[in-house]
Every structure is written in C-alpha cells, then in structure tokens.
C-alpha cells in the first residue's frame, strides 16, 4: 500500500512542496499506482485565478526532473489538526487494489495514520491484517507493497488497530458487509458466477438478478478482472446446471487466458457495462440452451442379417436392440467407423408391423434412418458402414446433462450403467 500526502491549496509551501502538491493532484488520473490519502473535506479552487495558478504550476512541473519520494512518519486527514483531534480513530476506504500484489489506494476520511500501525480490511477469503511500513508522497517509480493486500476488496473500510483494541472484534466489523452480500449467494453451486469491479456493484447485480421478472440464481462471486481461477470456479456448475455455467462480468476485463480456458471447458462469459444489458444477454442464452438441451437415451443396435430394404435416403434396416432404448428422433452413429454420423431415426416398426415411438432392449424392429444435413444424406449402407458394424445413439455432454435433468428419477441402474459406458466410449 502506498500513500500520498495531499497539500492544502491555500497553504504556504516551498517550491519543492508545491511540486509534490501538483504531482499528487494528477497521481490517480495518470494511474501511477501509488495510494492516495485524500481529505474528503478538502477545499477546491473556485476562482479563475486559482485555476490559472494550478495550470501554470502543472506546466512548470512537467519541465522538472523527478523528485525522490518524501517519507512521512505520520499523516493526518488535515495538516492543521490539533493533538486532541488526531486521537480520533482513523476512517479509511480502500479505493483500488492494484494488479501488483500488495498495492492499494485508500482515502483517509478522518484521523491519524502512523508508520507501524496495524490495519484490517475485508477480503473475499476473510479479513486481511497487515502493518504500515512507510508513509510517503508519490514518486512515479516508487512502490510500496504490504503482505496480503492483493486479497483486499475495493470499496471496503480499512480499520486501524490500536494497542488495546480487540483485533477479533475489528475483523468481524471489517467482514460484516462482505458477509451480508455473500449470504445472498446460493451455496449448492447451481447458479451463475458474477464478477464486478467493486463489492457495491456485485450487490447491485445480485439485487437485479433476484427481481421477479429476471430471477437468475447466483452461485459465486468475485471482484476485479476475470482470471482462469474464476473460470474454474464457474465450471463446477457444468454437471449440476449446465445452462448456468457462465460468468456475468459487469464492467471488468477478461484475461486472454481466462477466455481460452472458458472455451475449452464450455463456460460462457458475458460482459457489459450495464446491469440490464448483461442480464438480457444471459436470458437469451437460457432461451437458446432450452432449445439445444435435448435428452438422448443411450442405445446399442445390431444390424440383423436379413434383406436390406433400402441402402440410402432413407436407410431402412432390421435391427436388434442390444442395450438401452431406441427412440424416434435420436441421432445414430457408427463407432467402428470413426463415429461417422448417418442420420436420425425417423420411423420404427415392430415385428407385428405396428408403428411405435420407441423400442426396448431385446426387441427386433425395422427402423428408417434419415440424414439431417447434406453430409449425412450422402451416407450409404455397404459403403460407409456394413452388416458387422454396431450402431449406437450419439450422445454429447449437453444431451447427457439434459437426460439426467429431465429423467433422473426414471433411469434404472441398468440405464445408468449403460450411460456410463457410453460416456467412456465418447470420452465425455
């Protein structure tokens, strides 16, 4: 954590001090990466003369060489505070946690900070306790780092621990707001992962997601840019609730590594600077997933050595259901031919010449297989597969998830065993 002392605009200062005052004024905008201690009640120039003077100082400052960091033993919210006033318990807020570990911007609202003070600030993994090693005015190349502050939460209050204070009580106070937000997140891992720049933004996103017209479950949260670790956490939802394996990133960046991993795992990342726009993107995603999440029952078919009624468009075969359930509309492929897809079952007729919707294990039926795209329509019995080849229903991670979601209570032990074997076959 690094601190910058703000100099009152109306005070009489030396040339060197005036340089540092101008430097401080532009520290945050230029993103030097050094913490600022800013008096929230500071006076601002309100006349044309003051504004012109500041502009002149800024121009002069650009021509001057960099000055060394100015170390301080203590910093108050106002330089002219009396001894009694500086005994007030300091009030600070963490403004920004830098990408560089252990660096943070803070605002000193009230009170006094000293070198060696112990401080407590809320973090997503619990309260962060550290000590101030130095207080100094900023220099573009000077940085201070405090252990553990990379876990601090932007916008959280920072507490100073005095000699007789109970640190456990202060930890609870620091974490109270964080815990109140975390308590609104589902603990069963069946919700989306939300990410924003501050805890207040996450809270606003949670409020909007729970509105009656939206009603999106949230299963996890984080602060700051989306990293690989966030994608890994969001991927835990793939097995339980696949459509919610997503990250809603509100006004934060997504690292290239995180994007690549999300693509590999099947995690969707939605980004937007507006809460309503972000949630509308996710609602559209849910509508799309409802259309593609079609359950596919596993089945294994053996081609019977009878007269082949038709070899192509559609392919008509007599088959024996070795395992599982053959249903109309399900895709069929040939594992022995590099899983070539030959089409979908569009017609089933049992041995009594009745048209049926499905055939169970042990049944002998006649099926029609019709390609659902130009490539499948070109497939032909005798060329792309033969009598000795086994036919199976083609399953995907989405179809397996949909099957478990819709028919979990209806699947027998035998069905689950076959499903497990099929997942190994398709390397799911």
Image: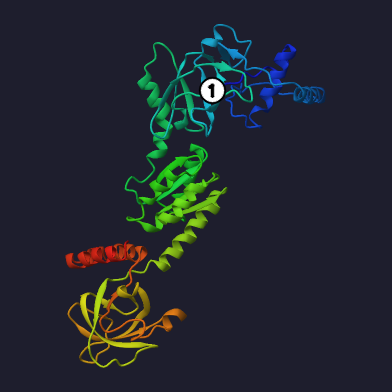
Vertical side of 317 occupied by 255: above or below: above
Q: Nearer the viewer, residue 81 or 263?
A: 263
* Above or below, comparing residue 208 to residue 280 in the picture: above
Residue 211 in view here: no
Image quarter where the C terminus lies is bottom left
x and y percentages locating residue 343 in the rendered image = 37, 79
Q: Nearer the viewer, residue 70 or 306?
A: 306
Image coordinates of residue 286 in percent, x first then y, are 44, 60
| Residue 422 visible in the picture | yes
**Image check: 209 left or right of 12?**
left
User: Residue 375, located in which quarter of the rendered image?
Assistant: bottom left
Residue 248 lies left or right of residue 343; in this view the side is right
Check the image and tell me how it is coloured: rainbow
Q: Secondary structure at mark 1?
A: loop
Q: Position of residue 282 (x, y in %)?
A: 48, 56
Disc 1: which residue: 144
Name the residue at 49% across, 61% down: 284
**Vertical side of 418 occupied by 273: above or below:** above
Give the residue at x 58% y 14%. Answer: 76
Q: Position of residue 240 (x, y in %)?
A: 32, 55
Residue 109 or residue 145, whichever sits in front: 145
Left or right relative to 255: residue 54: right
Q: Residue at x 48, y 37 (%)?
A: 199
Count how many numbered circles sit on residues in the image.
Answer: 1
**Mark 1: few/some/many CA within 10 Å (<14, 14-19, 20+):** some
Q: Nearer the viewer, residue 32 or 21?
A: 32
Q: Residue at 35%, 50% (x, y): give it.
A: 236
Position above or below: 234 against 286: above
Lateral position of residue 133 relative to residue 52, left or right: left
User: Toward which corner of the image does residue 363 lie, by quadrant?
Assistant: bottom left
């Amino acid at each position: 954590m690094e601190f910058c002392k703000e100099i009152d605009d109306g005070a009489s200062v030396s040339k060197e001090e005036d340089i540092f005052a101008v430097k401080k004024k532009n520290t945050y905008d230029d993103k030097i990466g050094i913490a600022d201690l800013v008096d929230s009640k500071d006076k601002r120039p309100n006349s044309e003369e003051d504004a012109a003077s500041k502009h002149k100082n800024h121009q002069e400052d650009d021509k001057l060489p960099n000055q060394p960091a100015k170390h301080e033993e203590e910093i108050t919210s106002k330089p002219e505070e009396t001894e009694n006033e500086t005994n007030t318990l300091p009030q600070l807020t963490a403004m920004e946690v830098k990408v560089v570990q252990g660096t943070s911007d803070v605002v000193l609202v009230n009170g006094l900070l000293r070198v060696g003070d112990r401080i407590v600030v809320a973090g997503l993994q619990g309260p962060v306790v550290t000590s101030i090693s130095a207080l100094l005015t900023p220099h573009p190349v000077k940085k201070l780092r405090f252990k553990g502050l990379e876990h601090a939460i932007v916008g959280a209050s920072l507490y100073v621990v005095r000699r007789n204070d109970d640190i456990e009580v202060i930890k609870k106070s620091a974490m109270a707001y964080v815990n109140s937000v975390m308590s609104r997140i589902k603990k069963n891992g069946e919700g989306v992962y939300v990410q924003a720049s501050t805890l207040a933004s996450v809270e606003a996103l949670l409020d909007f997601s729970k509105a009656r017209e939206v009603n999106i479950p949230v299963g996890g949260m984080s602060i700051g840019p989306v990293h690989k670790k966030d994608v890994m956490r969001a991927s835990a939802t793939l097995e339980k609730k696949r459509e919610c394996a997503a990250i809603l990133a509100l006004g934060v960046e997504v690292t290239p590594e995180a994007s690549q991993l999300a693509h590999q795992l099947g995690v969707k990342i939605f980004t937007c600077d507006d809460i309503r726009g972000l949630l509308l993107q996710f609602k559209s995603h849910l509508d799309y997933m409802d259309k593609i999440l079609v359950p596919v029952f596993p089945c294994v078919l053996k081609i019977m050595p009878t007269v082949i009624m038709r070899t192509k468009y559609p392919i008509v075969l007599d088959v024996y259901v070795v395992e599982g359930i053959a249903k109309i509309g399900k895709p069929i492929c040939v594992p022995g031919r590099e899983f070539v897809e030959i089409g979908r079952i569009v017609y089933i007729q049992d041995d009594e010449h009745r048209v049926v919707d499905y055939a169970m294990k042990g049944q002998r039926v006649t099926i029609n297989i019709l390609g659902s795209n130009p490539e499948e329509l070109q497939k032909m019995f005798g060329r792309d597969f033969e009598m000795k080849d086994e036919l199976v229903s083609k399953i995907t991670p989405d179809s397996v998830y949909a099957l478990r979601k819709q028919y979990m209570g209806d699947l027998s032990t035998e069905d689950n065993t076959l499903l497990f074997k099929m997942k190994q076959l398709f390397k799911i």
